[in-house]
Image: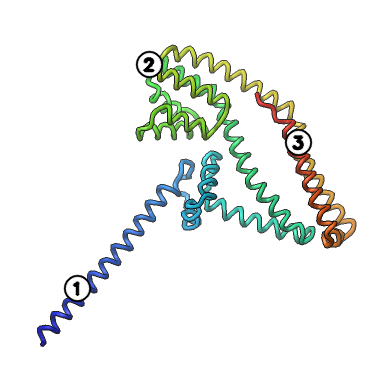
């Protein structure tokens, strides 16, 4: 009997030890998996060294959704040092603040309207950052083409020339070429790596450069002469784009001044007649008038922006 009790106690203790070891191994595995996910998903090509990321749990869950993946792709081409989770939290906080300020300064009806405008503004901000990065990259294309031509004339392979250009050029060209170099290092072909670059930063100038490099890599030929001619052409297009942008600067300012005048008129009416906006938006016809006015201002803004958009 005593022997059976000892065996039972021994088996129970062994089971407890195994359970503790299993829980410890499971916890260690989860911690290693979370650390690996942080390195693969949170760390990005634009992450500042030593910067502590916020909202990591939310960021991991957000990346698993369609909205998070779309936001991640958009952030990847803006150059912003922010994760999808951080941008989502900041955007929600900003929209909440805009809602409260508009409700307090104007009327409660303008709270959700201001939040919707703020949501559009957040997306417009990302598009503006993307367009600004593309424009800066286009301005660096003549120097990039010149570096590649010099490297080819010196007898360097295209892969080596791209790596050299990534080290010589500043952001964003240096960062984007570094990503191309990393893709080439893990076995991607030049066609694939350069094609992904053209998809991230779409522009006519970059498409021409990528096409020249891909065709020269496939069929050979006088790549040095082609790049020299392309450098001259890119310099001329750069000057033309600058002149067009200068000529259309007044139209661009007008497009942004139109909605500002609308908001200013609302503030003026509320200052002259305190409580007028509350009484106006308290009726259905007043709410419809405000919505129609916002729609007209939006149409005017879009039309003016379309008029000032000239592809060169």
Q: Residue at x 52, y 49 (%)?
A: 66
**Residue that label 3 marks:** 303
User: In the image, 186: left or right of 132?
Assistant: left
Disc 2/disc 1 C-alpha distance (Å): 69 Å
Q: How far from the left and from the top, in percent, is residue 69?
A: 51, 47
Q: Earlier in the sequence, mark 3 or mark 1?
A: 1
Residue furthest to the right in view is: 272
Tags 2 and 3 in contact by the CB under 8 Å rule? Answer: no
Q: Residue at x 48, y 51 (%)?
A: 63
Q: How far from the left and from the top, in percent, is residue 263?
A: 80, 49
Q: Is residue 7 above or below residue 20?
A: below
Q: Residue at x 76, y 32 (%)?
A: 251
Disc 2/disc 3 C-alpha distance (Å): 51 Å
Q: Is residue 146 above or below residue 163?
A: above
**Residue that label 1 marks:** 14
Tags 3 and 1 in contact by the CB under 8 Å rule? Answer: no
**Residue that label 2 marks:** 155
């Amino acid at each position: 009997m005593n022997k059976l009790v000892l065996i039972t106690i021994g088996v129970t203790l062994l089971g407890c030890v195994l359970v503790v070891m299993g829980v410890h191994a499971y916890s260690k595995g989860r911690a290693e998996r979370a650390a690996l996910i942080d390195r693969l998903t949170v760390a990005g090509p634009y992450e500042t060294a030593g910067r502590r990321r916020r909202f990591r749990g939310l960021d991991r869950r957000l990346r698993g959704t369609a909205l998070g993946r779309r936001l991640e792709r958009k952030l990847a081409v803006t150059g912003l040092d922010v994760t999808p989770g951080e941008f989502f939290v900041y955007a929600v906080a900003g929209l909440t603040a805009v809602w409260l300020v508009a409700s307090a300064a104007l009327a409660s009806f303008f709270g959700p309207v201001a939040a919707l405008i703020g949501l559009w503004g957040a997306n417009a901000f990302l598009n503006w950052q993307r367009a600004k990065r593309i424009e800066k990259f286009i301005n660096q294309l003549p120097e990039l083409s010149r570096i590649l031509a010099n490297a080819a004339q010196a007898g360097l392979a295209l892969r080596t020339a791209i790596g050299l250009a990534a080290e010589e050029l500043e952001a964003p060209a240096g960062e984007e070429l570094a990503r191309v170099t990393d893709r080439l290092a893990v076995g991607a072909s030049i066609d694939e790596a350069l094609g992904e670059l053209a998809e991230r930063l779409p522009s006519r100038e970059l498409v021409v450069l990528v096409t020249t490099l891909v065709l020269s890599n496939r069929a050979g030929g006088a790549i040095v002469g082609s790049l020299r001619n392309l450098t001259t052409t890119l310099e001329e297009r750069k000057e033309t784009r600058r002149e067009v942008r200068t000529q259309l600067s007044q139209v661009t300012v007008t497009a942004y001044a139109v909605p500002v005048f609308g908001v200013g008129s609302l503030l003026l009416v509320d200052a002259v007649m305190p409580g007028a906006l509350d009484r106006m938006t308290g009726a259905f016809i007043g709410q419809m008038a405000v919505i129609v006015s916002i729609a007209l201002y939006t149409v005017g803004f879009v039309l003016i922006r379309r008029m000032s958009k000239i592809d060169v």
